[in-house]
Amino acid sequence: MPATTTRLPRIVMAAAVAAAALLAGCSSAGSYSARLASSLSPYKIEVVQGNFISREQVEALQPGMSRQQVREVLGTPLVSSLFHADRWDYVFTLKRQGVEPQQRRLTVYFTADQVARSEGDTMPSEAEFVATLDKRKTGRSVPVLEATEEQLRAAASRNPTPRPSSPGSAAPAAAAPSVSYPPLEPAVR
């Protein structure tokens, strides 16, 4: 048997005995060990289940939308039951250490494969949800993710898009680059 496998438990045991001897020699060992035990807690992982649905997504949901359109806006439902084929349930749960668990629900009802109505909890905006996820609490604000008309015009003037040439124009249209792809199957010998 290799020496490392027999030495490791001996080293761990020696360290435990040394720590116990040190704590036993201190007069305040009892209070120290009690404080140490109360401050230690097991690590709990973040558990995220389901689809996060933002207020913006719920506002995009309109009566008369098809099931495919709803799937494109909200994603695949967490629950779609054979017994309730006329409804989709979206449930989102977030559990984090030291924070009250969050759970939100949204139910979309269909009639003839089109949205009839939806009901559920009040959903946070994307910016509000991102702010709750920041563990550092630095007081930073979430940047605005929408461009103003002035910003769009400025970007368009910096990067002008080439217009397609008309048949009578002098400048010929640029030819598409030729691309050669390798064969999908090996050559037969």
Image (tube, helix red, strand yellow):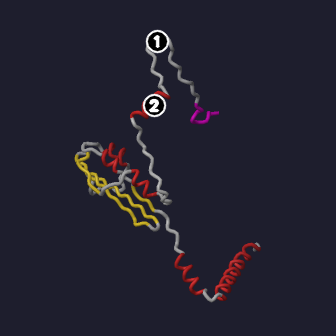
Q: Is residue 92 left or right of residue 4?
A: left
Which residue is under mark 1? 169
Q: What element carries label 1?
A: loop
The spot of residue 109 in percent (x, y) is: 25, 51
**CA–CA distance in space, label 2 to label 1:** 28 Å
Residue at x 39% of width, y 34% of height: 149
First in sequence: mark 2 vs mark 1:
2
Residue sticking out furthest to the right: 3
Q: Is mark 2 on a helix, strand or loop?
A: helix
Residue range corresponding to the magenta coloring? 181-189
Q: Eyeballing the image, is 2 above or below 145? A: below
Q: Eyeballing the image, is 66 above or below 157? A: below
The spot of residue 96 in percent (x, y) is: 45, 64
Residue 154: image tag: 2
Residue at x 48% of width, y 25% of height: 160
Residue at x 45% of width, y 29% of height: 156
Of labels 2 and 1, the one closer to you? 2
Report the amino acid beneath label 2. Answer: Ala
Q: Which of 45 and 78 is in front in this view?
A: 45
Report the amino acid beneath label 1. Answer: Ser
Q: Eyeballing the image, is 11 above or below 164? A: below
The quarter of the picture where the N terminus appears is: bottom right
